Amino acid sequence: MVNINLLPPENKLKVKQAKQSANIFSICLVVVILLGVSSFILKALKNDLLQPELDNTQKQIETQKAQLSSYNDLENKALLINDRGQLASQVGSQKAYWSQILQDLVNDVPTNVQVSSLTADLSKSPNFVLQGVTDSDRDAIKFKDKLESSSFFKDVNFKSSTTSQDQTSSQKLTFSLEFNLEQKSLSTSSNKGVK
Amino acid sequence: MNKTSWTIVIVSLIISVAIGFFLIRPVVFSSWKTYKSDQQAKKDLTETSGLKDTLAKLIKDTQLNNLYTVASSYIPETADSGNLIIELSGAAEQANMKVNGISLDTTSQPQAAPEDTTNKTTTPKTPSSTTTGSSLQEVPFTMKISGTFADFQKFLQNIETSSRLISVTALSLAQQNNAFSAQISGKAYWKKGTSLDKTLANIQISQDTINKFQNLKSYGNPINLPVESGFGRIDPFAGF
């Protein structure tokens, strides 16, 4: 069987355009409806799923916080311990361990040298001013060399030296040394803390 | 496409944009906000639960009170000058040194918190400091003592390992008429309250902190250098 369309061409075109418009309208309608529906779904998701979950979590937090208030005193103690621990580490890392510094200095003093005075101040330069008495230049130089080779001291300089004779007619050399503390030695002493 | 189709497309587009703007956009924004709040709330809940668990463990910890006492004596909440004098005199007495005078500068000054150079890495268990709270205050002091050099060294060791945090900043030693005398300047510290937030990391007490306060006598104790490394002198202020 053969279908023969006997409509005039203008009518054919009109029908075709009407079908096309109807198709487009349907598609657009579906898109608009989908958008509308999705907005409702999203709203429902938020109201029925997210919001109750949030409310529930917040309620649990409130309950926990209420229970925590009974631990307030304990909490403050723990905070103070940690705060003091932190401060002690900070101050300790910059603290000079003088007993160790002096021990190293003692180890550097030759047998024939007597220290008559020692002034140390880490806020001033030079950090150390030392006055000593010996009976020969050699010992004073030996002392200076030993201080220079120490890991605790640096920039060792002779400030002055005076020769005099005491009552027993033996020659005495009074000298003065200036030097600085090797800053690395500060951290060295505190880093070896916990044993 | 014919004119009618174009009209339908344009009208639909306008309607879609309107729906998107007036209906979908607020819902999406609001849902996103709720979702983010929920995530944050869950995080807070975990933190609070952790905090509660940690505190529940701490309450069973019998050494906490002892640690608190030690820590609050090490850096007290007030200048506590009286105890500082007792501490300094005790350290001297224990080392057989005679105290000739102690003076305190009561106008304590706040100290800028020194930078911690020993541990710069941030771990969850490391307490994190905040900018709130009072700062570390200093109590400067000067002390004159006399005795022997060997005892003076013992005195310094006592100060370095004392139950209160004390730093010696300057010293002046002299031997006159066969008598050894010393003048030391230093500072003790105090701080009102704490400057840590109430977070889980700040509540947990690390083993290092426990060790520090339980072993103040040995923590940071200087290594005793061997005498044989030098010329064998014990007292460099003594005559040769």
Image (cartoon, coloured by chain):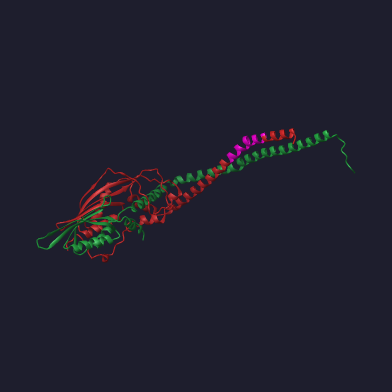
Q: Is residue A109 visible?
A: no
Query: Relative to B196, is B140 on the left or the right?
Result: left
Does B30 appear in magenta? Answer: yes
Chain identifier matching the green colour in the rendered picture: A
Query: Relative to A134, is B129 on the left or the right?
Result: right
Image coords of residue A7 (percent x, y): 86, 35
Q: Quadrant of residue A39?
A: top right
Vertical placement of A42 versus B124: above or below? above
Q: Nearer the viewer, residue B96 or A8?
A: A8
Vertical placement of B105 versus B235: above or below? above
Does B6 appear in magenta? Answer: no
Query: Relative to B121, is A110 on the left or the right?
Result: left
Chain identifier matching the red colour in the rendered picture: B
Residue placed furthest toward the bottom: B228
Vertical placement of B224 versus A59: above or below? below
Image coords of residue A191 (percent x, y): 35, 57
Start and end of the magenta stretch?
A: B14-31
Q: Nearer the viewer, residue A85 or A3?
A: A3
Image coords of residue B220 (percent x, y): 33, 57
Image coords of residue A1 (percent x, y): 90, 44
For the C terminus of chain B, give its image quadrant. Answer: bottom left
